[in-house]
Image: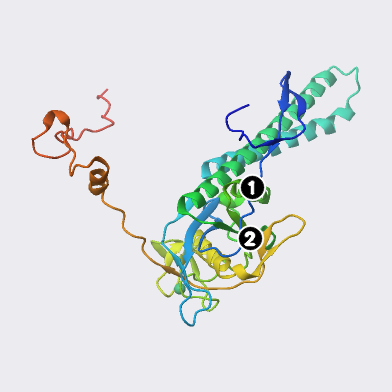
Amino acid sequence: MPPHVPAHATWCTPTLRVAAHRLRVDLPFTIPVPTASAVGHRVGLGLDWGVNTLLTGTVARLTDPLDGHAGGRVVSDGRMLRYDASAISAKLHRLRAHRERLAAKRDHYAALLPGLRTPHPQWADLHNRHARAAIEHDRVCARIRRLNHALAWSAARWAVDQAIATGAGVIYLEDLATLQARGHRKGNARLSGQVRGLVVAAIRHLAAKAGIAVVTVSARGTSKYCPRCGTGTSALQHVAAPDRPNRAGWKWARCTCGLSADRDWAAAERIVARGLLGQAHTRTDPATGHRTITVVVEGNVSRARRPRAEARRVRRANRTGRDTFTRPDRAGSTPGKGRPTPKRPAHQSHRPCPPPA
Ligand SMILES: [Zn+2]
């Protein structure tokens, strides 16, 4: 058995199939996973379906309830996690355009064919062209399908790895059913809702294996209000870029309280706040087992700096037991990195002028 199959796996009925003239055996197996608790989480990962990127996330934790505050405060350390798929998205866009062209070509040949009789000298040629266009169209469709699938699983792997690395016990996502079309249909907004559905299914699968709960929250108004000050009081201003505050756009969010942040990131902070504060309202669908929070509990997200990482020199000293690194052959000499800093070459033009003709 391959090494990735755990010893306690239960085998299911195998399937035989023919792929590329070879016989393949699909041998599915199941492993029991503990059901992750939907409530009682202190650290959560909020993910936003981005306008700028496929997924933008932020980690937030719930502080202990203070006197007077029922559920505590949501505090984020300001890390921005983003899964940028612009290259794959552009590739998918080109493939979709190619698919449309091939479909138009195929339909055009199909419309011409009935006009010609079989003995006509051009009939065979036209028939071949039609068949070739149809085959090419099918192949491009299959390529798009495979690319969507690979993209979805890659994004889900990324998301679950972020949750594991940051110690989050729950992933909050926007409910696709309540997601409104927002921003311009440009950039990654091209990524279809179908890909998002695949990503959600893949995240659920991978998170279950890692013991992390996946809960969807309502997507309404997540990018409309400020995550710092506006609990539905003042709408965020969306501009083109941080250095162009007067130009209308959708990528950057600004607030009168001084917030200036990536739009998707601000939305992710609101999503994680809705999730962590609304845990008591979590509902589980009895048919699918999917968790969702339909009640919107708004709350602001404070920013707290995470503890400063130890300097590299201190970490190295802890590891090696020596204060500074000294090369063995230079033991006793001045401590340092052990070699002189190389001189930078004098500035040279990378593109010399062509010799005069
Ligand atoms: Zn604000």
Amino acid on which disc 1 is placed: Val
Compared with residue 68, is residue 301 higher up or lower down, i.e. above or below? Answer: above
* Nearer the observer, 148 or 301: 301
Graded by Cα atoms within 10 Å as few (under 14), some (14 to 19) or many (20 or more), the crowding at tag 2 reads many
Disc 1 secondary structure class: loop
Instruction: In the rendered structure, find residue 216 and report the number of the disc placed on it.
Output: 2
Q: For the residues marked 2 and 1, what is the alpha-carbon distance in whole angstroms?
A: 20 Å
Q: Residue at x 84, y 33 (%)?
A: 111
Judged by depth in the image, the label closer to the viewer, 2 or 1, is 1
Amino acid on which disc 2 is placed: Thr
Q: Are marks 2 and 1 in contact (CB under 8 Å)?
A: no
State which quarter of the image contains the N terminus: top right
- Report the side of 51 relative to 124 (left or right): left
Disc 2 secondary structure class: strand
- Counting residues from the N terminus, which is met first, the one under dot 2 or under dot 1? 1
Graded by Cα atoms within 10 Å as few (under 14), some (14 to 19) or many (20 or more), the crowding at tag 1 reads few
Q: Give the residue furthest to the left.
A: 333
